[in-house]
Amino acid sequence: MSISLLLLIVAVIGVAGYLVGSQRASALAGGKLSSLHSRPGYYGSFVAIWAMLPAVLALLVWLVASPIYISSTVRDGFPDEVKAESQATQNLNYNMIGAISRGLSLLTPEERTALYADGTTARTVLAAKGVPLAADPAPYMLKAADDLNRMTTASSTFRSILALIIAVAGGALAYRSIAPRFRARNRVEGVMLVALIGASSIAILTTVGIVASMLTEAVHFFNAVPAWEFFFGTVWDPRFAAAGATDSSGQFGLIPLLAGTLYIGLVAMLVAVPVGLFAAIYMSEYASRHVRSVAKPLLEVLAGIPTIVYGFFALVTVGPFLRDISAQLSGLVTGNYSSFIQAQSVLTAGFVMGIMLIPYVSSLSDDIITAVPRALRDGSLGLGATRSETIKRVILPAALPGIVGALLMTASRAVGETMIVVLAAGVAARMQLNPFEPMTTVTVKIVNQLTGDLEFTSPQTLVAFALGITLFVITLCLNIYALYIVRKYREQYE
């Protein structure tokens, strides 16, 4: 029985438990619900929870433990000469056995008989069924594949029986527990509280897992390359090594990548902040309701455009446009029609990224400005201030903490952008102040270092994790500072 069908049956049992539990509670009340500790729905929910939750938990445990047990059993059946080989070779053999087992389930009895003639025949028969093998399977692999199929089928059967028994038994025990003074509401709310705590913990655990995974590999990198060379180096030249090599030759200076990240982010913020902030002021203070209902959704459409599309826009339109304009200006001034703005440059990437960030700035700022109490506006206008004076001297100062926080979070979004930089600014790790020349960012080099058939053993690959943890710390500091600004200045206006 498939997992989806089994979950559906358990859900049906839970729904049935809810109905019979509610009906039993109503019957015990005898039409007088005040005699019950909880409403009938809570009794039904209690039965449904005990019918579904234990069965789902048992199913999850089985799905984790069963493959581990089956894999261990199959590997124990390997010949001694295979067990003496490396773990990587044994893993490859087990993967081939898994492919053979999937092919065996597609064969007729006659084809299964022909399969055991020899390895070449087995490879041919399985290839005809859409299961290509990289090499001729050894005889022990065919036997192991049979064992794997048999244990997998048995595991599926026992799993289904166990889940259904637990669902029915849990529902029956909960049904028998129903009594007029039974605290069903407390039990149900306790389960929901645990579920809410678990859901809220997912984000924390995910963050911890991400940091731990990056930090572990980053430590391996710093064991090969000194930390001071990475954080204070001014040359980025990793010199890719072959797969499996551990040669640490090359220079892994972070400074050029960090400079490009901050430079392009600065240009993007110079474009996004004025436009987005002015748009937010207009829509919140000047635009009519009809104009706002049309302009705000249209502006926020920009946030839904994939970043790769912005990258194509920069590569095909903005970059060539700036290059051609610079060539025309150079020709008018010097007579030499050579462009001083390259198609891939800091300006191109920053400008297009700024366009992408406009809806983030405008939407967040609009919500913050709109949340300023109406009494502040009315008081300022009542004292004779104009609308523009009210915005400059009352509304914006009151909304300043939220706006600053929104801008810092937008900066975090700019720091983490990749696709626009790849297509609009290039991949050259350089240190220079000319915005008309190409540079690159930390995120681009993370992608470059992890692209291709590489092993996580050389500094050329492990440096991506050092770059990732550095970028994580930068964005974390920006977010913490944003929260600090919001909390510090909000107190002055509350």
Image: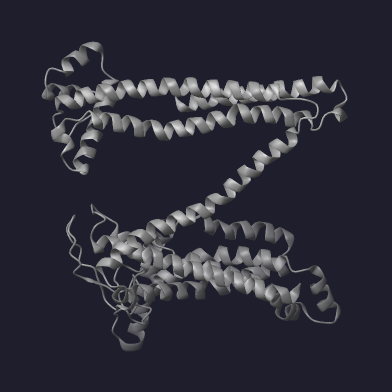
As drawn, the residue found furthest toward the top would be: 110
Q: Quadrant of the N terminus?
A: top left
Q: Is residue 377 visible?
A: yes
58 or 342: which is nearer to us? 58
Outermost residue toward the bottom in this view = 334
Taking the image as shown, residue 129 lies to the left or right of residue 469, namely: left
Q: Is residue 337 above or below residue 475?
A: below
Where is residue 64, by image quadrant? top left
In the rendered view, would you say 117 is above or below 484? Answer: above
Splitting the image into 4 quarters, where does residue 46 fall? top right
Q: Is residue 105 above or below residue 317?
A: above
* Residue 92 rendering spot, x and y as whole percentages: 21, 38
Viewer-proximal residue among 71 and 260: 71
Q: Residue 189 appears in which quarter of the rendering?
A: top right
Above or below, 77 relative to 199: above
In the rendered image, residue 63, in percent from the top left (x then y), is placed at 43, 32
Q: Residue at the location (58% across, 58% down)? A: 300
